[in-house]
Amino acid sequence: MSRIPIHTVEDAPDASRPLLQSIAQLSATGRPLNLHAQMAHSPAVLAAYASLRAVTAEHGTFDPEVSAALALATAATVGNDYVVSITSRLARMNGWTEDKVAVLRTGTTTGDAKIDALTRVVREAAANSGKVTDATWKAAQQAGWSDEQLTEAFAFLGLTVFTGYFLNYAQTDTDL
């Protein structure tokens, strides 16, 4: 059972309403998801989440398929079914087949050595408080990922960890 009640746009705190409305307009359901409606209790939390999403969308250089792979690989490590559902859906929407979504969840090979090397970095970071072994890092570099891209991967890791930890913290009921 959820620890934090679900807000609507109409009953959310004044400072959260514009963000919650914006999120609702981008939602496939036309309304905020439970996670957004709970985050709305604190405008700071909702704004932090929305800012991470906006920054990765505006300044990110990865194509949507890579971004989705990073989010799903991280989500599978965070340990929350809701965030895994969200990122699995995102991966399918961005070109990953159901079989590849399954392997991104489990950490087995996608058949793309470059993607596998990068998802290993975020998976390891998510499992170890941001720590990644030199061997994992170097394997990603040898697979062709630049320092800029390895740095940017952290933004997707951060957004997904932020979301997954909030869902665990609030015990959010899934609505997907």
Image (spheres, rainbow, N blue to C red):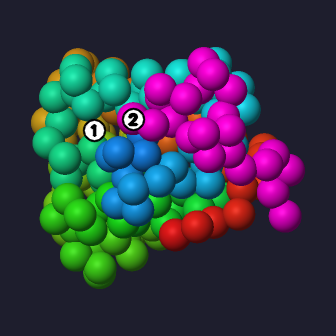
Quick one: label 1 or label 2, which is nearer the N terminus?
2
Q: What amino acid type is highlighted by mark number 2?
A: Ser
- Horizontally, is 61 left or right of 74 in the view? left
- Residue 151: assigned label: none
Q: Residue furthest front?
A: 10
**Quarter location, residue 142:** top left
> Label 1, label 2: how many angstroms apart (C-alpha)?
36 Å
Q: In this picture, is 105 found above or below 23? A: below
Q: Residue at x 47, y 26 (%)?
A: 18
Q: Which residue is mark 2?
A: 22
Q: Residue at x 71, y 50 (%)?
A: 6
- Which is more foreground, mark 1 or mark 2? 2
Q: Residue at x 39, y 75 (%)?
A: 102
Q: Is residue 15 magenta?
A: yes
What is the x, y in percent for residue 112? 17, 61
Q: What amino acid type is highlighted by mark number 1?
A: Ala
Q: In this picture, is 150 found above or below 86? A: above
What is the x, y in percent for residue 167? 68, 49
- Horizontally, is 115 left or right of 13 in the view? left
Q: Is the magenta region chiefly helix, strand or loop? A: loop
Q: Residue at x 53, y 22 (%)?
A: 47
- Horizontally, is 94 left or right of 82 in the view? left
Q: Which span of residues is magenta-colored? A: 1-22
Q: Nearer the viewer, residue 23 or 151?
A: 23
Q: Which residue is mark 1?
A: 140
